[in-house]
Image (tube, helix red, strand yellow):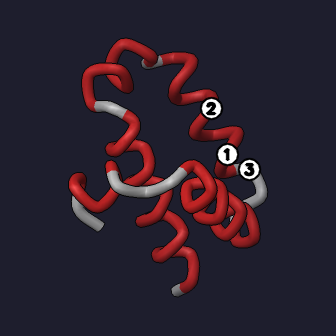
Amino acid sequence: MSARQATELTPEQVQQIANHAEQYNPSVVDQMSDFYAKHSGLVKTLGSAALTIALAKMANNMKG
């Protein structure tokens, strides 16, 4: 997934990705939230697209 593709995702699609990732790692959303809380400036600089890409890649890697 590219940054351009990530910026085109709807909130519903992001939720679907998060739900899928949680099936393989129930704590993934908590981990992402914790990362955001600790590094909110970085996340704002990179943008939500970067987090969406990271979450999607984690979900794909967990499928194995």
Q: Quadrant of residue 31?
A: top right
Residue 39, image x and y in percent? 43, 18
- The residue tagged with tag 2: helix, strand or loop? helix
Q: Quadrant of residue 40?
A: top left
Residue denoted by label 1:
29
Residue denoted by label 2:
33
Q: Which amino acid type corresponds to the residue marked 1 in the rendered image? A: Val
- The residue tagged with tag 1: helix, strand or loop? helix
Label 2: few (<14), some (14–19) or many (≥20) C-alpha neighbours in 10 Å: few
Residue at 49%, 64% (x, y): give it.
58
Residue 17, image x and y in percent? 58, 63
Q: How far is mark 3 from mark 1, CA to CA?
A: 6 Å
Label 1: few (<14), some (14–19) or many (≥20) C-alpha neighbours in 10 Å: some
In the image, 38: left or right of 42?
A: right
Question: Do callouts 3 and 1 mark residues in contact (Cβ within 8 Å)?
Answer: yes
Residue at 33%, 44% (x, y): give it.
50
Residue denoted by label 3:
27
Question: Do callouts 2 and 1 mark residues in contact (Cβ within 8 Å)?
Answer: yes
Q: How far is mark 2 from mark 1, CA to CA?
A: 6 Å
In the image, 34: left or right of 44?
A: right
